[in-house]
Image (cartoon, rainbow, N blue to C red):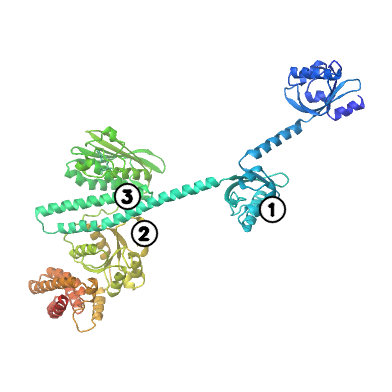
Amino acid sequence: MKTSELLLNHANLIVVSANKNGHIKYVSAAAKKISGYKTENLKDDLWWENTYSSKKEGLNFKKNVIQVLTNKASINQKPYERKLHCKDGNYKWIEWRDSLGVNNNYVSVGVDISDWKRKEESRIQSDAILKNIPSMVLVSSKKGEVIFASPSAEKILGFTFEEIKGENWWKKTFLSKNKAEDTKEAILNHVFNNEKTYIDIFKQKIKTKNGIDTWIEWQYSKGANNSFISIGTDITNRIITDIELKKAKEAAEESVQVKNDFLANMSHEIRTPLNAVIGFTDLLLETKLTQEQREHLETMQNSGEILLTLINNVLDLSKLESNKFEIENIPFNLNRTLNEVVKLMKVKAEEKEIFLNLNISPNVPEEVVSDSNRISQILLNLIGNAIKFTDKGSVIVTLNKIEENEKASIISFEIKDTGIGIVSNKINSVFGAFTQAKSDTSRIYGGTGLGLAIVKKLITLLNGQIKVESVFGKGSTFTMILPLQKGSKTETKEVEREIDTKNQTLGYSILLVEDNKTNQLLAKTRLERWGCTVDIANNGFEGVKKTQQQLYDIIMMDIQMPVMDGYEATKIIKNDISAEVSKTPIIAMTAFTSKTEINRALDAGMDDYIFKPFKPDELFKILKKHGDKPKIDKELINTETAMEVVKNNKYINLDFLKKETLNESTVMVLLVELFFKDLKEYLQILEVKVKEKDWESLYKATHKIKPSISMFGIAKLEPVIYTLEKIFKEESNLEDIDSLVRKCKTIIVNVKRELKVELKSLKE
Ligand code: ADP
């Protein structure tokens, strides 16, 4: 092989030469190698036919060559690019240079530029991408100096590359120098050392050339030669939308909150007078009444209770709607709970002469964990409806286990009645708020259409489901499916006996801290019926003062009060007065039924709580629970305190009364006159009943007069009355009675004298 040919091969050059007829007579070895054809398939016309993109194109080129060789056309001196069609069907880019050889041959020399071309193409593509993608791409050095910025950077930020290259990026786009420094360090640490920092390098607020704040979301990766690439997308619009959405959400939440606060307050405001209506009706019902009066009062009592249920329902629904409802998970005995619910409902069923039955399948676990109060609430509602909408026949409650796994059982609770049923086109709407199946339902059966809406939401909260099937005129079946966690044995709660609170005596001294006058009167009357003495404080501050003067058996404390609220007063009474006083049980009286409020009350040191309006038996039970705890000998303390109060020789001290009545002379006159009457009555009882040795009546009368003695500040009489009360109650030390009664009468005579003077000046 000639040296030149060796060289050609080594240089990987394609060399072909054509004679004047356009036939290829020479093909270098590299042409073979690059195209993949054998030499014989590249010679003569086969070159033109095989290596061009089409035979036609090849033969056209051949024609051109012949024209050059016959001097009919001039040769193209410039290099040009043409694809070489290879044997495997692919193309390779070749840069050609054509010239005329020594024997008047046409010589084409080609260099394979495919690799370069490929790179070039990908470069063109990258450029196009960089130019067209909305994100900006920065390449920075290991020190963070910007060495490349894609055109989008200018579009987004308004800075040309020249303006932000090097350190300028950090100086110009950041809001402060410190922020720039910290961010740069954090990014370098992230890219090169994989370290995390507290700075959010993936989302940054930077500024444009016009000074507009712009949010950029960044992605980082390592680049070539120790550089790193940052791809930044403008997310300002997204952030603004997010902020607006967040604001809208907050506004919506706020309006729900406002609605809830409104409902909570309104329910409180309504409950307070309702408390009085129901309470006084209860009190009146305990007195002697004609049949007609009794009936009217019972209707009143009933209406009051319906109103209360409605308020509770509205409040429950609003809490459920704003996800403020708290669900408990506490072990309880399902059997017992069901029996209690059915027992409660039996009374109603019996009134309507409907058969109410409970079937619990033996496969239903007895001990479960869930919210027993809520389950009772749901069942009371469903069974209540079933009884309400059934005029004859039965209501059957059936419990079955449908499924079970290690932790939980799925129980179905079916409430089937033979009542009026629901028309098929209304069956889906009964769970909506304020919806009733028929427009005359409310008129005939009462109700508001809230019960099932609450039931449905409660069941959803308990992860259960409810469905209803009904045949109009024949009856309905409500089925609730509830998952209940398995529980271990719970202690059997002693079933509380119903107490007839009418003729009970408690005889406690009670401090009633309550700002509402109606509630004061209601509670006082109720408590006095049970033989309790009641001191009233109008707010927490007065309450605290009273506990400094006297030791009580029980303090009943309202929570929301002017001047000082119940929490504050409790804290002081429990911590700052004396060891004895701190032991006095404090019972919170609250109209709010929120757990937070109860917890707050208990945290403040209250011993128990009762919801207003309270039912007489609830109040009785709670008082008995706390009042019967052993106490220290308060009698002694009371007597001593009373003695201290005597400041001068006067028998009465009307300071307290004046303050209580805000110095209102008409009220004072009224009270003094009433007291006159009471004193007269009491003297008569003393006269008659001592002779009859009717200690009980004497005890009651003494007990009744006691609070007024304190109210009129008759300090001298207080120890006498206390002792008498004790003697009459315990029927001990009876021999002291005569002298005490005498003392009592003497004091009362003096009191009356002084009161007459006071009365006269009051009337003037
Ligand atoms: P309310 O009982 O206060 O009207 P609910 O939400 O408890 O409200 O019930 C909505 C409506 O569904 C009722 O008014 C009644 O039309 C229908 N409904 C509920 N339970 C029954 C039932 N057991 N039988 C027939 N109709 C029922």
First along the sequence among labels 3 and 2: 3
- Using the rendered view, name the quadrant where residue 80 is placed: top right
Closer to us: 621 or 78: 78
Judge left or right: residue 311 versus residue 223. left
Q: Which residue is mark 2?
A: 599
Look at mark 3 in the image and give the residue it sits on: 316
Label 2 amino acid? Asn
Residue sitting at x 33%, y 65%? 565
Q: Is residue 729 visible?
A: no
Q: Is residue 37 above or below residue 429?
A: above
Residue where numbered disc 1 is placed = 167
**Identity of the amino acid at label 3?**
Asp
How far separated are the C-alphas under marks 3 and 2? 19 Å
**Residue 208 percent coordinates (x, y):** 61, 50
Task: Say which of 118 and 359 sits in front.
Answer: 118
The answer to whether 262 appears left or right of 127 in the picture is left
Can you say which quadrant of the picture contains the C terminus?
Answer: bottom left
Of the four image quadrants, the one with ligand 1 is top left
Label whose residue precedes the other's in the sequence (1 or 3): 1
| Tag 1: amino acid | Glu
